[in-house]
Amino acid sequence: MTYQELLEAAVRVREKYNQLNARDHGGAWDGDKLMAGFVGDVGDLSKIIMAKNGHRAMDNIDTKLSHELSDCLWSILVLANYYDIDLEEQFVKSMSELEARVDNALNA
């Protein structure tokens, strides 16, 4: 999948959640609620990483890790879309800046 296809899939799922939340909870999630959901996903990811490194007991760690990483990616894509951020463009820019910074540090 291309970045655009990933974004479109994430937005489609978000639109379905909007319908579900409107029906069951009176409205779609705003940016604050989307962020709170992401923080919850990051917390779950942290527990899975701890289990992956032997610090917690957990079954099906790799399956859960794959799932939670994709949940976090979904949240990031949805948040970027919600706040009208061109994440693909910004990611390329940020990686270029970081690479240059690390290269300068390595060559200092």
Image: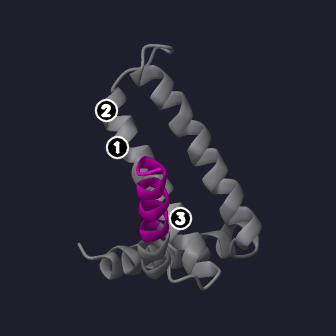
Label 2 or label 3, whichever comes before in sequence order: 2
Q: CA distance from mark 2 to mark 3?
A: 21 Å
Q: Earlier in the sequence, mark 1 or mark 3?
A: 1
Look at discs 2 and 3 and give the one toward the viewer. Answer: 3
Q: Is residue 45 left or right of residue 18?
A: left
**Residue in the image at 34% along x and 82% along y:** 4
Determine which residue is flagged by label 3.
Answer: 76
The residue under label 1 is 66
| Relative vertical location of residue 42 with respect to residue 1 in this rendering, above or below | above
Query: Which residue of the protein is positioned furthest toward the left in this rendering?
Result: 1
Image: magenta residue range = 95-108
Circle 2 is placed at which residue position?
62
Question: In the picture, which quadrant includes the N terminus?
Answer: bottom left
The residue lying toward the viewer, choosing from 19 and 53, is 53
Asked whether residue 17 appears in the rendered view, the answer is no
Looking at the rendered structure, the secondary structure element under dot 2 is: helix
Rendered location of residue 82, percent (x, y) = 62, 80
**Residues under numbered marks 2 and 1 in contact, where contact means CB atoms less than 8 Å apart:** yes
Which image quarter: residue 6?
bottom left
Q: Secondary structure at mark 3?
A: helix
Q: Position of residue 78 (x, y in %)?
A: 54, 72
Q: Disc count in the image? A: 3
Residue 101: say if magenta. Answer: yes
CB under 8 Å between discs 1 and 3: no
